[in-house]
Amino acid sequence: MLTAFEKAVGKPPEELRVPSNVVEKAKTREEILEIFQSSCPESTVYHLSNGSFMALSQDNESVQPHPRCIVVLDDVFCIFIGTLENTSDLRRHYGLPRQATEAMVVVEAYKVLRDRAPYPPDQVIKDLQGKFAFILFDARTDTLFAARDRDGSVELHWGMAGDGSLVCSHNLDIIIEACGKFCSPFPPGCIFTSGSGLMSFVHPMHKVRASRREDDNGQVCGVTFQVDLYTRIPSIPRTGSASNWADITLVKEENNIHP
């Protein structure tokens, strides 16, 4: 799995910004896709607006630790890796047929949140039980939505390309080739949206902070995102049914408190 969203759409966290000393190692979206297709010629690629794309390869699927699939429903694209333990319950909850896959369930959950929900997305993501990671893109609203299960059972990494695009993949080698070594594991138990940024659905009242990693020579080589259990967010605003959930913004704390 490989996705790349141009900067204005992906809105990558500033902490993922590639330092000036490694910019030459990070590639553009076009170069990244060319490399991926050359190594996975049978991959499925969806070309989105402004050069963004979502790609999935089924090569060597029998030896992969988790199943993978991609669906497109009502201009919502979703790549899902893993399995949900409560798929049957979720199908009934959302009124979906028995044939609905995990990816279809995620798309339906997103659409309910987008169109009718009076609560933030963490409340619904908590209902997903299992081992999973997914990337979802709503082409109608240019909204990106990504999540990884609370135990980090499925690999998911992200980084910033040389042109500022947000790149995501379950394959660390792909991310390193695309973004250089300045990349990061997507934090377990978290969701990222282009509307509200990165937050924990396990600890929604606490901020997710980034700390920089250094190599043996003391050079910054990446970042690690972790939930800061010492810093609480004062409140999470609830939105009415007329509001688009993607526009939710967390209340910014006035004072930074560090242990």
Image (cartoon, rainbow, N blue to C red):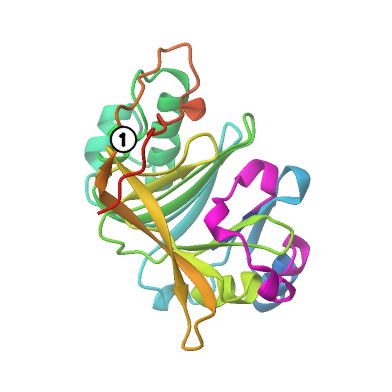
Q: In this picture, which residue range is highlighted in magenta?
A: 5-31
The vertical placement of 76 against 259, above or below, is above
Identify which residue, 146 or 96, lies in the foreground. 146
The answer to whether 74 appears left or right of 252 in the picture is: right
Q: Quadrant of residue 99?
A: top left
Q: Note whether 170 is above or below 195 in the view shown.
A: below
* Residue at 61%, 34% in the rendered image: 75
Query: From where the camera sits, is residue 170 visible?
Result: no
Which residue: 65% across, 71% down? 178
Rendered location of residue 92, percent (x, y): 26, 30
The residue nearer to you, when weighing 127 against 191, is 191
Residue 132 position, x and y percent, is 34, 56
Quadrant for the N terminus, please: bottom right
Q: Amino acid at mark 1?
A: Ile
Magenta-colored stretch includes residue 120? no
Instruction: Between residue 160 and residue 126, name the one nearer to us.
Output: 160
Residue 72 left/right relative to 131: right
The residue depicted at 40 percent of the width and 29 percent of the height is: 251
Q: Is residue 192 visible?
A: yes
Q: Quadrant of the C terminus?
A: bottom left
**In screen coordinates, is 31 left or right of 114?**
right
- For the residue labelled by badge 1, is the local secondary structure a helix, a strand or a loop? loop
Foreground residue among 196 and 244: 196
Which quadrant of the view contains residue 203?
A: top left
Q: Position of residue 59 (x, y in %)?
A: 54, 74
> What percent of the width, then of the height, locates residue 177?
63, 76
Label 1 Cα crowd, 10 Å radius (few <14 / some 14-19 / many 20+): some
Total count of labels? 1
Residue to which mark 1 is pinned: 233
